[in-house]
Amino acid sequence: MATLRAGSCKLLLAAFLLISSLHAFLVTSTEFTVGGEDGWGVRRSNRDRDVYNEWASRNRFKVDDTIHFKYQKDSVMVVTSEEYEKCRSSHPLFYSNNGDTVFKLDRPGLFYFISGIAGHCERGEKMIIKVLETEATPPPQSANENSTATSQSSPWPFPMYSLASAGAVLTASFFA
């Protein structure tokens, strides 16, 4: 009987650790390289004036993601919306000119980036990134929607609350 109880405790501990570690798969961040392989810099063509905002609009950013700026003889600044519109800032919220800058998106909302080199922002070296709110609970479904839909952010083909329920059932069965 004691051996059975010790085995059950080990299995229970293993199940708890497995379920707890699954949370790490859901809480992940992504590093985005601004501008792809071309990096951060003034584009040669006027057609590319909006290249950074077009790039940002193709991506979905969430809190704790990072954006990586690769550049030469340039800089990157985080500024207010007014400074973004004016393409200049005497007191940026963030400044870097090391050629290899990683910036953490630490809150939901809008982030405004411009080059700190005179004339670069006016020639299109600027970008707005929208960081999405994190969903604490899934949005309610209407009666017309398919109730088997799963979250796109989850790497699992089944809802995570199923795992929590399974863990609760396993726990209850070991102590019964």
Image (tube, helix red, strand yellow):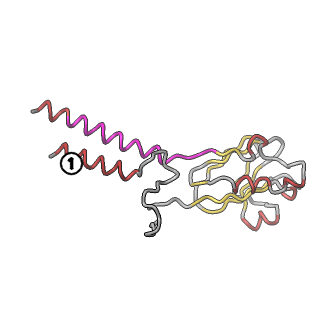
Q: What stretch is highlighted in magenta?
A: 8-31
Image location (x, y in percent) of residue 163 = 35, 48
**In which quadrant of the rendered image does the N terminus lie?**
top left
At x 11%, y 32%, the residue is 2
Q: Is mark 1 on a helix, strand or loop?
A: helix
Relative side of 139 to 86, left or right:
left
Residue shown at 36% from the left, 39% from the top: 18
From the top left corner, tell me how far across and down residue 160 is, in percent: 40, 50
Q: Is residue 31 left or right of residue 92?
A: left
Query: Dividing the picture into quarters, in which one does residue 78 lie?
Result: bottom right
Residue 97 in percent (x, y) is at 77, 45
- Which residue is painted at 15% across and 35% down in the image? 5
Magenta stretch contains residue 25: yes
108 or 101, nearer to the observer:
108
Residue closest to the far top: 3
**Residue at the extreme left of the image, as rendered:** 1
The image position of residue 74, as x and y in percent, is 82, 46
Between residue 105 and residue 164, name the one nearer to us.
164
Which residue corresponds to the image point at 72% horizontal and 64% vertical from the top-left?
A: 80
Residue that carries the numbered disc 1 in the rendered image: 172
Q: What residue type is labelled 1?
A: Ala
Most common secondary structure along the magenta stretch: helix
